[in-house]
């Protein structure tokens, strides 16, 4: 019998229906699954995964198993697991350790349980699984062929590990593929973050002053969607080029010290701690909404907010009302964790199709070549991005032009001039 720990096995049928819906929206990954059933590129591999347990992730898990791998899984955030999806995966024979509302200790217990498989490959979102291997289970690195990392924050962590000479096995930075960061991060984060804010608050976005901290790919997507819903968007940044891009995209740029006085809705998307701190809460408007769409919950300093509050209550699902000592109220969504996953369902299936296709192909690459790769951070070939994008376009009935033989020759003809 499969070993697992989830919230409620009776939710399996509801989870299966959600997974089937996602499969109907993820044609690229489904095509790869059908090919994998025949060729079994992951035959004999043991894959430990630490990634948000959503319906889209379940499509990836099914695909990895169809390709011949044995799988164990945990969620990569205490509040992002969809319990019905976890139940469906357990019912299908996946060793899964995940439920919504984990404590910190439970979170790492779940990761440790996945490692009992003694994996040959790891798949991560945030690098907590990778770091657990390096920190508490170093003996497992000897049997590790390689791993993959899904998100910007995690890639920063593993690059820092590699720079310090601490990385023990090769990791493919899936996040750095164009068909991931320029689609999932922008369009996925933009839509799903607004979805989470609306589910948790049901406020009118139009006419509100919407402060976006960080104008990387995720922040850009959020700003674009908030603007599209009629918000007046202010961007805060520490990187001059990112701030300049925000200005040229039509947004106002201010330091957070100034933006804190003006905002109705705040969202952090930086990957950095202490983006919103006590001095910002001190000047916020009555009724301000505060949330985060970065991977970790350290961007909003809730300790500072607690110290300034005389009361707190749960007023809606994923919405806590803090009453400050001067009587003002500030609302924190999803406990400062990923608002798009803790208060909603995460990215739409269509945009995760390419991201998870990259994850799957990265595992296949490691299964073929990982034993000959030295510890370090690697990227997927740019040709793969174009191939996946072309497949995606085809599923949407879109055709594009091709270069003629003369054009191909011209693009490499350095002597051609005026």
Image (cartoon, rainbow, N blue to C red):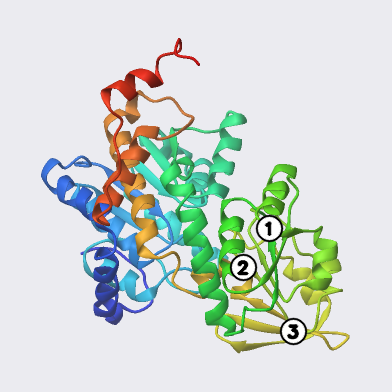
Q: Which mark is residue 241?
A: none
For marks 3 and 1 on the same chain, the one whose residue lies earlier in the sequence: 1
Q: Secondary structure at mark 3?
A: loop
Q: Which mark is residue 250?
A: 1
- Relative height, residue 224 to residue 162 (above, below): below
Answer with the quarter of the image where residue 411 lies: top left
Residue sitting at x 86%, y 74%: 283
- Count residues near mark 1 (Cα–Cα under 10 Å), then give few for <14, some for 14-19, many for 20+: few
- Count residues near mark 2 (Cα–Cα under 10 Å), then give few for <14, some for 14-19, many for 20+: many
Q: Disc 3 vs disc 1: Cβ atoms closer than 8 Å?
A: no
Q: Which mark is residue 227?
A: 2
Residue sitting at x 50%, y 54%: 185
Residue 120 spot, x, y in % from top left: 33, 40
For marks 3 and 2 on the same chain, the one whose residue lies earlier in the sequence: 2
- Relative height, residue 326 to residue 96 (above, below): below
Residue sitting at x 35%, y 33%: 383
Instruction: Estimate the spatial distance between the alpha carbons at disc 3 and disc 2, rounded to whole Å.
Output: 21 Å
Q: Disc 1 vs disc 2: Cβ atoms closer than 8 Å?
A: yes
For residue 318, side relative to residue 382 (left or right)? right
Instruction: Estimate the spatial distance between the alpha carbons at disc 1 and disc 2, rounded to whole Å.
Output: 10 Å
For marks 1 and 2 on the same chain, the one whose residue lies earlier in the sequence: 2
Residue sitting at x 30%, y 80%: 11
Instruction: Estimate the spatial distance between the alpha carbons at disc 3 and disc 1, rounded to whole Å.
Output: 26 Å
Residue 317 spot, x, y in % from top left: 55, 85
Q: Report which residue position mark 3 lands on.
A: 287
Instruction: Please state the total of marks drawn on the protein image.
Output: 3
- Relative height, residue 355 to residue 258 (above, below): above
Residue 271 spot, x, y in % from top left: 64, 53
Q: Secondary structure at mark 2?
A: helix
Answer with the quarter of the image where residue 224 lies: bottom right
Quadrant occupied by the N terminus: bottom left
Q: Nearer the viewer, residue 179 or 302?
A: 179
């Amino acid at each position: 019998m499969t070993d697992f720990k989830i919230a409620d096995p009776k939710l399996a049928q509801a989870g299966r229906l959600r997974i089937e819906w996602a499969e109907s929206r993820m044609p690229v990954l489904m095509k790869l699954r059908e090919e994998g059933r025949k060729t079994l590129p992951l035959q004999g591999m043991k894959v430990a995964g630490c990634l948000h347990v959503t319906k889209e992730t379940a499509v990836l898990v099914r695909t990895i198993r169809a390709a011949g791998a044995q799988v164990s899984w945990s969620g990569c955030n205490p509040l992002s697991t969809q319990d019905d999806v976890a139940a469906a995966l357990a019912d299908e024979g996946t060793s899964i350790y995940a439920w919504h509302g984990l404590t910190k200790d439970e979170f790492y217990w779940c990761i440790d349980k996945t490692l009992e498989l003694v994996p040959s490959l790891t798949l991560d979102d945030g690098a907590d699984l990778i770091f657990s291997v390096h920190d508490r289970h170093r003996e497992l690195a000897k049997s590790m062929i390689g791993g993959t990392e899904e998100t910007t924050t995690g890639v920063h962590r593993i690059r820092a590990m590699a720079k310090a000479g601490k990385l023990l096995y090769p990791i493919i930075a899936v996040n750095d593929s164009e068909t991931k960061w320029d689609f999932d991060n922008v369009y996925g984060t933009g839509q799903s973050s607004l979805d989470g804010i609306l589910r948790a608050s049901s406020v009118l976005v139009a006419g509100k002053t919407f402060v976006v901290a960080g104008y990387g790919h995720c922040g850009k997507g959020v700003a674009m969607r908030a603007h599209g819903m009629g918000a007046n968007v202010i961007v805060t940044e520490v990187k001059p080029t990112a701030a300049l891009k925000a200005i040229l995209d039509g947004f106002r740029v201010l330091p957070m010290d100034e933006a804190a006085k003006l905002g109705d809705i705040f969202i952090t998307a930086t990957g950095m701690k202490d983006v919103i701190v006590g001095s910002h809460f001190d000047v916020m408007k009555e009724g301000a909404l505060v949330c985060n769409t970065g991977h970790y919950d350290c961007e909003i300093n809730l300790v500072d907010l607690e110290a300034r509050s005389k009361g707190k209550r749960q007023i809606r699902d994923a919405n806590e009302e803090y009453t400050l000592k001067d009587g003002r109220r500030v609302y924190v969504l999803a406990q400062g964790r990923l608002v798009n996953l803790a208060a909603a369902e995460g990215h739409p299936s269509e945009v995760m199709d390419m991201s998870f296709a990259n994850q799957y192909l990265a595992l296949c690459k490691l299964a073929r070549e990982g034993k000959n790769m030295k510890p370090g951070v690697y990227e997927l070939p740019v040709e793969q991005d174009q191939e996946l994008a072309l497949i995606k376009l085809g599923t949407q009935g879109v055709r594009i032009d091709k270069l003629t033989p003369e054009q191909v020759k011209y693009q490499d003809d350095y002597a051609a001039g005026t």
